[in-house]
Image (cartoon, rainbow, N blue to C red):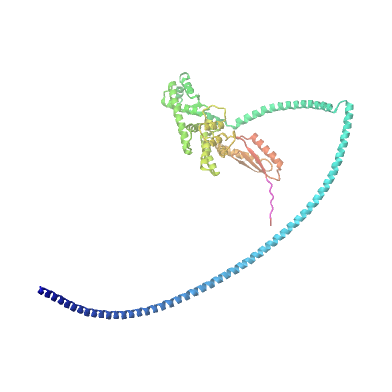
């Protein structure tokens, strides 16, 4: 036990001694290390001081350079600004001087203008003063005239009273002599005058009636003869007759048939008259309905080609031909409305448009006339600045304006009114219906399209060549019209306008008076009426213009 304690004590003492030795050794070692660190720190501090001093010197040198450069730059900017300010000052000074000069000129002009206005105002004042003086003098004169008139009126009134009194005395004297009162004498006198006037009036009336009857008969004959002369007979023949050409005259016998049964059956089926005469290799088909003539012509063509001509075959061929022609008419109408870019037209109206192909008016094909009128209406509407919708409506009305001429219904209405009824029946726009019905002034126009359709219809019908008048005869008629006017004394120039529907005559003012211009217009119109043949009417306009010309040298 004691041994153990001694060993433990020895170990503790040895450990303590070892600790102390290690402690002192570590202490000396740390001291040395601290000294080394302090030495190194002193060296580093000295180097940092030297480096900072060097950098500070370099920064000061660089700052001095920058300051010098900035001072130079500022000096340059200062000099430039000064020069710019001087230039601007000089420019503003010159502008001010020029404005000052202009202002002086304007002031002078204004002063001159003010002086002229003052002069004008003074002259106006003088005029007004003179006018006022004249007015006052006239007013005084009027007052004196009024006073004189009042005096004269009093004298006249006094004279009137004296005359009335004298008349009363005379009337009383006459009543006592005639033993009649004034009213009784007046009544007897009126009855005598009335009876005499009635007898004279009856004689004049009888003479006028006799003269009117004689002249009416003469004028009626003259009008009928002139109307017949103005319408060329060959046009009527061309519009009512078709010629069917044959290969040989032997076929005529087959067409006539035994005892004429074939030709009678053909006439009954088609409603056209067939004339077989001595004309070689030709048969004449006559009818005022062009569709009937066309049906008869096509049926004859099929029968001749087939060779079997008898009543049953004729009825069969005519029925097929009518059906084929109806289809062809509808096709013509559809093609026409497509070409004109017209949409939504009722099928019945489309068919009526196709029927126009086989109808003529004054020798002019109705379909061509309607198409031409439609194009003219669209052009005129566009030129007048109407909307595209109105232009299309004008084209539609132009195509349908003569639709009443091909109506299948018998009516006493004119073609314009009948066409309007057809358009209303088949739901056309009210504007189109009015344009169709009013294009011959039979109803009142209520929209802008109606006068356009009327004008374009007249243009299409009046242009040269439209109504089957060849160019040579047209030019001859126009020349004859102008020459007729030039034959009068005092006529300077004569121009035929509107395809010969108007003659404009220019006369010399020193040879023709205003009163004679009226007489000249009447004489020329009468001479045209008596000596020329023309369609429609010719308007004669005589123009007398006086011009005064002088020269300033």
Residue at left 69%, top 53%?
Answer: 550
Q: Left of 486 or right of it: where is 262?
A: left
Is residue 467 visible in the rendered image? The answer is no
In depth, the one of 423 and 4 nearer the eye is 4
Q: Which residues are magenta?
A: 545-551
| Residue in the foreground of this view, choosing between 129 and 462 | 129
Magenta segment includes 365? no
Q: Left or right of 63: which side holds 448?
A: right
Q: Is residue 263 above or below residue 132?
A: above
Task: Give x and y (percent) for residue 222.
Answer: 64, 29
Q: Is residue 327 above or below residue 463?
A: above
Residue 220 versus residue 518 in the image, above or below: above
Q: Which quadrant is home to the C terminus?
A: bottom right
Residue 424 position, x and y percent, is 53, 32
Task: Specify the farthest residue to the front.
Answer: 2
Question: Where residue 381 appears, x then y in whole percent?
Answer: 54, 42
Q: Is 547 contained in the magenta span?
A: yes
Query: Residue 195 at what x, y percent from top left?
Result: 79, 25
Residue 16 can be seen in this image: yes
Q: Secondary structure of the magenta portion, mostly?
A: loop
- The residue sitting at 78% across, 51% down in the picture is 135
Q: Residue at x 87, y 32 (%)?
A: 168
């Amino acid at each position: 036990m004691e041994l153990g304690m001694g060993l433990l004590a020895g170990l503790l003492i040895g450990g303590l001694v070892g600790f102390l030795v290690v402690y002192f050794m570590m202490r000396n070692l740390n001291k040395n290390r601290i000294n080394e660190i302090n030495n190194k720190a002193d060296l580093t501090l000295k180097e940092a001081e030297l480096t900072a001093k060097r950098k500070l010197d370099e920064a000061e040198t660089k700052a001095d350079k920058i300051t010098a450069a900035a001072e130079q730059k500022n000096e340059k900017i200062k000099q430039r600004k000064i020069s710019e300010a001087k230039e601007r000052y000089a420019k503003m000074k010159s502008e001010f001087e020029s404005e000052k000069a202009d202002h002086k000129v304007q002031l002078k002009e204004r002063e001159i203008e003010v002086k002229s206005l003052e002069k004008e105002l003074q002259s106006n004042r003088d005029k007004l003063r003179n006018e006022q003086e004249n007015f006052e003098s006239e007013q005084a004169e009027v007052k004196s005239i009024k006073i004189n008139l009042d005096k004269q009126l009093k004298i006249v009134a006094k004279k009137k009273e004296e005359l009335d009194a004298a008349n009363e005395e005379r009337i009383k004297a006459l009543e006592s002599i005639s033993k009649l009162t004034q009213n009784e004498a007046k009544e007897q006198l009126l009855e005598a005058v009335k009876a005499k006037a009635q007898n004279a009036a009856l004689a004049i009336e009888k003479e006028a009636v006799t003269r009117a009857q004689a002249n009416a008969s003469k004028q009626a004959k003259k009008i009928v003869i002139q109307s017949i002369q103005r319408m060329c007979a060959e046009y009527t023949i061309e519009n009512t007759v078709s010629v069917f050409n044959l290969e040989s005259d032997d076929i005529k016998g087959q067409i006539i048939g035994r005892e004429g049964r074939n030709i009678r059956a053909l006439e009954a089926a088609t409603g056209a008259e067939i004339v077989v005469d001595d004309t070689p290799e030709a048969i004449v088909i006559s009818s005022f309905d062009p569709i009937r003539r066309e049906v008869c012509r096509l049926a004859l063509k099929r029968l001749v080609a087939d060779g079997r001509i008898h009543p049953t075959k004729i009825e069969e061929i005519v029925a097929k031909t009518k059906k084929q022609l109806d289809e062809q008419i509808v096709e013509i109408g559809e093609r026409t409305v497509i070409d004109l870019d017209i949409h939504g037209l009722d099928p019945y109206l489309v068919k009526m448009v196709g029927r126009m192909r086989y109808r003529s008016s004054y020798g002019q094909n109705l379909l061509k006339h309607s198409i031409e009128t439609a194009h003219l209406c669209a052009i005129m509407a566009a030129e007048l600045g109407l909307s595209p919708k109105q232009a299309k409506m004008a084209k539609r009305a132009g195509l349908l304006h003569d639709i009443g001429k091909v109506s299948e219904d018998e009516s006493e209405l004119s073609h314009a009114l009948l066409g309007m009824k057809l358009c209303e029946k088949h739901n056309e726009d009210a504007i189109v219906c009015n344009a169709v019905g009013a294009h011959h002034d039979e109803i009142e126009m209520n929209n802008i399209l109606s006068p356009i359709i009327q004008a374009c219809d007249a243009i299409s019908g009046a242009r040269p060549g439209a109504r089957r008048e060849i160019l040579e005869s047209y030019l001859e008629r126009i020349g004859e019209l102008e020459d007729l006017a030039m034959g009068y004394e005092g006529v300077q120039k004569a121009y035929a306008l509107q395809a010969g529907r108007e003659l404009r005559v220019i006369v010399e003012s020193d040879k023709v008076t205003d009163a004679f211009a009226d007489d000249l217009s009447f004489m020329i119109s009468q001479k045209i009426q008596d000596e020329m043949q023309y369609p429609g009417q010719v308007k004669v306009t005589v123009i007398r213009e006086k011009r005064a010309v002088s020269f300033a040298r």
